Image: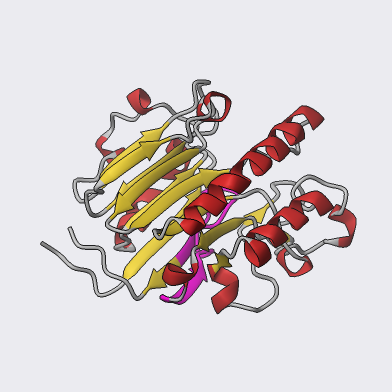
Amino acid sequence: MRVSEFMRIITANTNGIRSAGRKGFYDWMLRQRADVICIQETKAQEFQLTDKLYHPPSMHVFFHDADKKGYSGVALYCRHQPDKVVYGLGWPDIDSEGRYIQADFGNLSIISLYMPSGSSKEERQVVKYDMMERMKPLLLEMQASGREYLICGDWNIAHKKIDIKNWRSNQKNSGFLPEERAWMDWLIDEAGYVDVFRQLEPGEDQYTWWSNRGRAWENNTGWRIDYQIATPGIASKAEATSIYKKKRFSDHAPLIVDYDHQLAG
């Protein structure tokens, strides 16, 4: 049995797990000695991931794929065997897109969440709003359950002006719409969840996604849309955070948080 001195959680949108793997993501991931890595946008189905690269012997891996090949999908890499793994929300339309997977460790649930993007067309923004609305009672139920929840992933929303470089010109664009930002206000201010990164890092110019257009990466013209959102108990144990930008594995950067909490396995 190994007991960590602290719990390291990483969330990363890989924009294609095979593409990220070719860019060295797995070598980097294993060096982090993280307890749980939450991945979004795997863009693969499990039967396509037979190479040992995707199944490190030191990790337990769980995939929740989209029905559509090359689309969406979430995964969890866990150093310890979870007590239970929950695949999906029980909502067929959302689950068919592979947007939610949850691992339970004692009284703590760790979730990899991939919120829909509404940037491609108006119909997808409607899907996004629908999922946001349906999540409200679920999030309140989680908060009232007595369990601790850590919801990691790509929420596809920049919450405040500090979370997006060009906020003025993006106020009518998906990801920074008033309705989306108000939903994040509700999540933090009314539902009582904690944006763990912001709890630890109040500074400006902290982003996790950059458009591939123009020179967004070079100029740090980014958006902070990847989060670790937590119930207050586990959030209070967060001690350090960072956004890894030394090497690029996708158009997102991994978000790392260390917690004064132990996961035994």
The quarter of the picture where residue 45 lies is top left
- Whether residue 252 appears in magenta in the rendering, the answer is yes
Residue reaching furthest to the top: 68
Residue 24 visible, this orientation:
no
Residue 225 placement (x, y as % from top left): 64, 55
Vertical side of 252 occupied by 87: above or below:
above
Q: Which residues are magenta?
A: 237-256
- At x 86%, y 54%, the residue is 171
Residue 4 visible, this orientation:
yes
Relative side of 156 to 234, left or right:
right
Residue 32 placement (x, y as % from top left): 34, 63
Looking at the picture, the colour scheme in use is secondary structure
Name the one closer to the observer, 170 or 25.
170
The quarter of the picture where residue 30 lies is bottom left
The quarter of the picture where residue 106 lies is bottom left
Q: Please identify the dominant SS of the magenta region.
A: loop
Relative side of 124 to 3, left or right:
right
Residue 87 placement (x, y as % from top left): 40, 35
The N terminus appears in which quarter of the rendering? bottom left
- At x 22%, y 54%, the residue is 80
Name the one closer to the observer, 159 or 31.
159
Relative side of 25 to 245, left or right:
left
- At x 37%, y 35%, the residue is 63
